[in-house]
Image (cartoon, coloured by chain):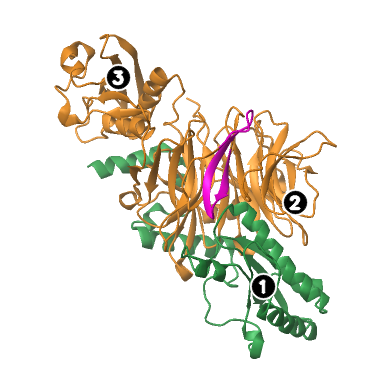
Chain colours: A orange, B green
Amino acid sequence: MKLIPTAAWIRTAAIAALLLACGLPTAQAQLTIKITSGVNHPVPIAIVPFAEAPSDSVDVAGVIQHDLVGSGRFSALARTQMPATPTHAAQVAFPDWKSTGVDYMVVGRVVPLGGGQLAVDFNLLNVLTGQSVVRKRFTGTEAALRNAAHRVSDAVYQAITGIRGAFDTHIAYIADVGAGAAQRFQLVVADADGYNQHLILESRFPIMSPVWSPDGKWLAYVSFEDHLSAVYLQRVRTGQRYRVSARAGENGAPSFSPNGQELALTLSGVSGYPQIYVLDLHTRQLTRVTNTPAINTGAVWAPDGRSLYFTSDRAGSPQIYRKSLTPGSFPRRITFTDSYNASPRISPHGTRLAMVTQVDGRYCIAVQNLKSGAFRVLTQGPLDSTPSFAPNGATIIYAKRSDPNGGAILATVSVDGMTGMTLKPTHGAVQDPTWGPFPQH
Amino acid sequence: MRRIVTVMVLAAALGLAACASKPVKPASQSAAGAAGAGAASQGAGSGANAGEGSLGNQQSVPGPQQGLLADRTIHFAFNSAVIRGRGIQIVAAHAKYLADHPSARVRLEGNTDDRGSPEYNIGLGMRRAESVRQAMLLQGVSPSQITVVSYGEERPVDPANNPIAWAKNRRVDIVYLTPTQPAQ
């Protein structure tokens, strides 16, 4: 996205710099992951420990195994069950591996290239045929070794499932740490597996509704500095930010258009109901989309950029509607199941609608097929919220509140509802997770 | 050694450039709790120049304290913005005070319980604050004396997940502004 900020927007950038901080304490910040349910027929695979150049570096095979098992589509052979530790295909005695029951195995090694650069070589082998399925080399800095491991996961996942992997991606979320006068809200960016947490913004006031630009370079979010809500855009790498909406009343629920040139958002004005608008980020022209005496909020774009899905309680309870951006068109109600459907999210291909729904008093994540209308509740609740699709559409991340006394944690669920896991932070509560786009390698 | 490598990865993975160019020192955040507090006091203090309001320091609450006026919270039923029972009297008492003191100003902060959609809850909190604002305007308060904000589910008074906590959190707080605080 090319964004040309106007002078008025630039002024807030200086203020933003003072609010920024970098890095989170890594020892406390790691997330633990727990598989909560399993798919019917996961593919058995062995991820053999890689030959590692720096002796005490990242466990590359461990990262890959964690990714693949976490997707629910694979089951991994325990290292203690492995008959050997080959790092080249030529070293593999296939009959020994066949007897362990795995269909595939990954062997590889980390090769130092000098100057802090490393290569990760891997070979995905079909154990039944003895053939190589895919072999590749990823190069990068030693510091980015975890990311290289995620790229191996992506390649293995795609070779076996036919679906592009989304392990080498990022998530953003809000962490709520401390209490009372020490309470802080943090906007955090992390790898999709919860590692490499990076503090983007910290404030004594609430921060909410972060969303990624389509190119992954920007985050838009709502911040309540000075008790006033405002929508900001912030460059993830530099921290430079622009306040793009600080009108009287609510400024909320930003969402980038698919081409990154426009922002849907919610404005209430001094008095009155929250309504949805579209802000052109270049001309700053504001176009009103909804106009009903009801709450209209939480707009997201259809992938073709021609319509918005949003939450409205115009019919009494919150439900999801779709409105074409063609002038004069009328909104159409999309959800009819249950009395509460909100927080719409559209899958990358535009075929599925994820939302939070209320089932017997429990708030759960559900998915509706936009073609067939089929509605499926994916999670058990009781207090799940803010779903967000992975860029490959296979997984949804959401905030899960299950501790009766505590805040939310992050959790993922596959779109078929078969596999879920939690990413539990070791301090603070987390909310509003949002999955970033595919990286631009 | 493994931890050192992790730190290196962290620095490289995403926002290394942000660290290099920004004034907040990473060194100020060496431990979880202290890090949060340290960085934030720099950030919000010098950056946002935040008024205290209902956040943070609560030792001296501005505004009138006598009788019903000491009560600053109006509670609501689930998914409702209707002022009921004692809430009607509280709103009336503050409306009378504000009408009698045209220089006094308040911020009405709408809040919800933390179930469901955060964005929808902002709308619901706004509706509650607006409900109180309209009641005050009908009782002679000037629009210029009132500003509203909705925090939705972001600022619960009780973070527990049970019906008692939820009932406490569905509220509008009336916050009297000191003369130096911006109304808007």
Look at the image and say whether residue A355 sits in the magenta stretch: yes
Q: Are marks 3 and 2 on the same chain?
A: yes
Magenta residues span A354-375
> Toward the viewer: B54 or A47?
A47
Dividing the picture into quadrants, the one containing residue B14 is top left
Mark 1 or mark 3, which is nearer to you?
Answer: 3
Look at the image and say whether residue A441 sits in the magenta stretch: no
Which badge, 3 or 2, is on the more N-terminal residue? 3
Give the main secondary structure, helix, strand or loop, of the magenta stretch. strand
What is the quadrant of the N terminus of chain A in the image?
A: top right
Mark 2 or mark 1, which is nearer to you?
Answer: 2
Residue at the image point whose x is 36% and y is 58% from the top: B32
Q: Which mark is residue A121?
A: 3
For the residues marked 3 and 2, what is the alpha-carbon distance in whole angstroms? 57 Å
Q: Which residue bears the numbered disc 2?
A: A314
Mark 3 or mark 2, which is nearer to you?
Answer: 2
| Residue most extreme to the bottom | B66
Callout 2: residue from which chain? A
Under circle 3, the secondary element is strand
Q: Mark 1 and mark 2 in contact (Cβ < 8 Å)? A: no
Q: Which residue bears the numbered disc 1?
A: B181
Q: Which mark is residue A216?
A: none
Amino acid of disc 2: Arg
Residue A116 visible, this angle: no
Q: Quick one: label 1, few (<14), some, or many (20+) residues within 10 Å?
A: some
Residue at the image point whose x is 23% and y is 13% from the top: A89
Callout 3: residue from which chain? A
| Residue most extreme to the right | A328
> Viewed as shown, does residue B127 lie left or right of A88?
right
